Image: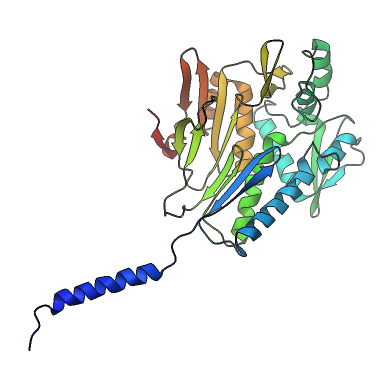
Amino acid sequence: MKFPFAPALARTLLLSLILLLGACQPAPTQTRIQGNTMGTYYAVTLSDPFPGGQGALQQEVEALLARLNKEISTYDPGSLISRFNQGTGLPPQVIPATMAKIVQQGIDAGHLTRGVLDVTVGPLVNLWGFGPDKRPVRRPSAEQIAKARERVGIDKLTLTPEGDHFLLGKAIPDLYLDLSTLGEGAASDEIAGLLEQKGVHNYLIEVAGAVRSKGHNDKGNPWRVAIVEPSDRPGAIEDVVTPNGMAVSTAGSYRNYYELDGKRYSHIIGPATGEPVTHKLVSATVITPTALEADALDTALMVMGPERAMAFAREHKLAVYLIEKTATGFAASHTPEFAPYLVRKQP
């Protein structure tokens, strides 16, 4: 005897079985931790499981960040960099490979930008009140600026490999090293390294403006990173990029500033002038393979200003996105190398 309804019943049963099996599969999960570090914030989002769970992830990331702070924080008088700044440079100070990588990036970026980025600019940063020292009650004098500039120059800094460590030296006793412009990028890269060691390959790492990502989110889509409008409007987005495994770092002059005698002073200090920048470039975003490199370059571009920064980016074929303040609002521009990462343009 034949049962004409059997094929339909079989299809119904098969569909029910597929739905049942699908329901038994664990749904993609996302883990997110966040906290404070280096005077700013960090956040790590995973769509892969972390060995030991969220608690272990938080503990290991914060231990990593604490170690990094002990190496490069100028706000910690006992850190390696503070001991270097307080010493005479003789004999050269032993530093670990992690710190040496950051110093070397600063030296390399300094040479590439012909001194526009200078990791020894600390005396000027402190003079203008953006370092551990208090903010000035009046504008620094030309004499104070000139005196501080005498202590600035990457040519006065030496880094020498020796076995499994490095020797950090200085040509003048009062040379002051400041790696704060590279700290966020270094932290993002270090966290990415930790995750890779743990077998985590789908993640988004944010340490303030320095972002590292790889793979996909819990919905299977590539990670997206917003370029925020440089204004006081919370959540205002200028553009969105898909990094595709690359690092993204943004520097800006629109948040870290103070006003003195009716004038606004930005934390972006030009080593050549010894003063905060006054041009119209308010944000620079760079995409490179590492966050450390991107973090170095975005600061240098901010020092250069819009025209010089764009010319430099085009000369070196960098993926760069600049936002300039104009009389009618903000104007964005980018290099051809940046275009493939753009997802959409805000209307």
Q: Is residue 303 above or below residue 178?
A: above
Q: Residue at x 65, y 60 (%)?
A: 56
Residue 108 in sight here: no
Q: Is residue 321 above or below residue 259?
A: below
Q: Residue furthest bottom?
A: 1
Q: Between residues 338 and 258, which one lies in front from this camera angle?
A: 258
Quadrant location of the C terminus in the rendered image: top left
The quarter of the displayed image where residue 72 is located? top right
Q: Between residues 50 and 300, which one lies in front from this camera angle?
A: 50
Task: Give x and y (percent) for residue 65.
Answer: 71, 48
Q: Between residues 240 and 259, which one lies in front from this camera angle?
A: 259
Residue 192 is left or right of residue 219, and the answer is: right
The quarter of the displayed image where residue 60 is located? bottom right
Task: Give x and y (percent) for residue 1.
Answer: 7, 89
Q: Is residue 184 above or below residue 222?
A: above
Residue 26 is left or right of residue 72, and the answer is: left
Count of marks placed on residues: 0
Task: Give x and y (percent) for residue 84.
Answer: 86, 38
Task: Give x and y (percent) for residue 244.
Answer: 47, 47
Residue 199 in sight here: yes
Residue 184 is left or right of residue 150, and the answer is: left
Q: Residue at x 77, y 39 (%)?
A: 73
Q: Residue at x 74, y 32 (%)?
A: 119
Q: Residue at x 67, y 53 (%)?
A: 61
Residue 240 is left or right of residue 313, and the answer is: left
What color scheme is it?
rainbow
Q: Is residue 305 above or below residue 234?
A: above
